[in-house]
Image (cartoon, grey):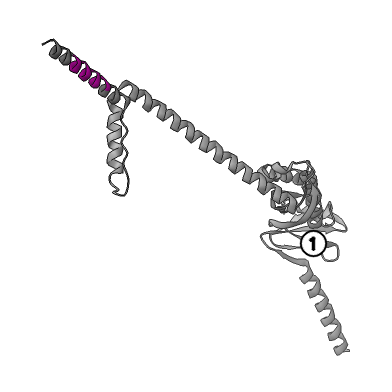
């Protein structure tokens, strides 16, 4: 009888220890425990040490840290009928653990599905140029839509980033040709602008030379000096029109003097 009583006492003590152990709960700083009592929510507890009523209460642990959700590649068509493949990344966290447990079966899967459908919808309403050049605007729009959809579940979406945009090979070649044509256009505009500026400078120089004829002679002498530094060059001098007029005037004067002298000699 003593041995039987000892066994029963040990069994009862073990049972009590198991119950007490299950009644003690410890949650970390970044966790919360949602308590159900007889199937009804009584609130969230933690962090730290607390007790629950065994059998009558049950605790579900919820992680409050920010989670990173990788949205798989989504195939969609932009508003201007260009097929693209887009993937994104979503950063979210639980702000209301009670809603995260009671309002949705699996908040991680639900957020992933919302992110995928929203990504396809937003990309389908945007033009290809917006997708390539205004990605920040699309990121903000995605974050707003997903955050509003997950708010009833106690989820806060903090950031949504479009990671990569994959275009068809034909579209990539067309965009490369467009970029090359744009660079060629800019180069031609730059060359034309340089020609215009050079023409303006030459016009100003011509006006200065027309007002000061000696400037042309000084420029000619300077050019000859620059060319003469290389002995292999052949220098051909060009005379200004003013010098030709001077030589013609001197020649006419000499002819007139000679004719006058000849007439005087004949008279004598």
Left or right of 12 on screen, residue 129: left
Residue extending farthest to the left is 268
Q: Which residue is mark 1?
A: 59
Residue 198 figure quarter = top left
Whether residue 84 is in magenta: the answer is no
Q: Residue at x 71, y 47 (%)?
A: 174
Q: Is residue 78 above or below residue 54?
A: above
Place of residue 201 in the rendered image (x, y in percent of width and height, measured from the top left) = 41, 30
131 left or right of 268? right
Instruction: Say above or below: 150 vs 222.
Output: below
> Would you identify the image quadrant in which residue 261 lies?
top left
Identify which residue is drawn at 63% across, 45% down.
179
Q: How many marks?
A: 1
Q: Nearer the viewer, residue 144 or 89?
A: 89
Residue 99 visible in the displayed image: no
Q: Secondary structure at mark 1?
A: strand
Q: Position of residue 87 (x, y in %)?
A: 74, 54
Queried whether the magenta region covers residue 255, the answer comes back as yes
Query: Which residue is located at x 73 percent, y 45 percent?
Result: 142
Please provide the residue range marked out in magenta: 248-259
Residue nearest the viewer, comparing 152 with 261: 261
- Quarter holding the C terminus? top left
């Amino acid at each position: 009888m003593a041995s039987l009583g000892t066994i029963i006492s040990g069994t009862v003590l073990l049972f009590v220890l198991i119950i007490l152990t299950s009644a003690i709960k410890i949650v970390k700083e970044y966790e919360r425990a949602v308590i159900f009592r007889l199937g009804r929510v009584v609130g969230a507890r933690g962090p730290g040490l607390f007790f629950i009523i065994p059998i009558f209460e049950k605790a579900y642990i919820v992680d409050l840290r920010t989670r990173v959700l990788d949205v798989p590649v989504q195939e969609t068509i932009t508003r201007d009928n260009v097929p693209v493949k887009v993937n994104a990344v979503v950063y979210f966290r639980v702000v209301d653990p009670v809603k995260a447990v009671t309002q949705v079966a699996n908040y991680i899967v639900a957020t992933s599905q919302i992110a995928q459908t929203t990504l396809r919808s937003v990309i389908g309403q945007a033009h290809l140029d917006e997708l390539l050049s205004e990605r920040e605007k699309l990121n903000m729009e995605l974050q707003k839509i997903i955050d509003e959809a997950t708010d009833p579940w106690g989820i806060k979406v903090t950031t949504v980033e479009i990671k990569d945009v994959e275009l068809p090979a034909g579209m990539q070649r067309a965009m490369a040709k467009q970029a090359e044509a744009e660079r060629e256009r800019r180069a031609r505009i730059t060359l034309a602008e340089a020609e215009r500026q050079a023409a303006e400078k030459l016009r100003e120089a011509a006006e200065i030379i027309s007002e000061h004829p000696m400037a042309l002679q000084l420029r000619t002498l300077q050019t000859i000096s620059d060319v003469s530094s290389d002995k292999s060059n052949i220098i051909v001098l060009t005379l200004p029109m003013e010098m030709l007029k001077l030589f013609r005037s001197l020649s006419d004067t000499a002819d007139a003097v000679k004719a006058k002298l000849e007439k005087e000699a004949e008279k004598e």
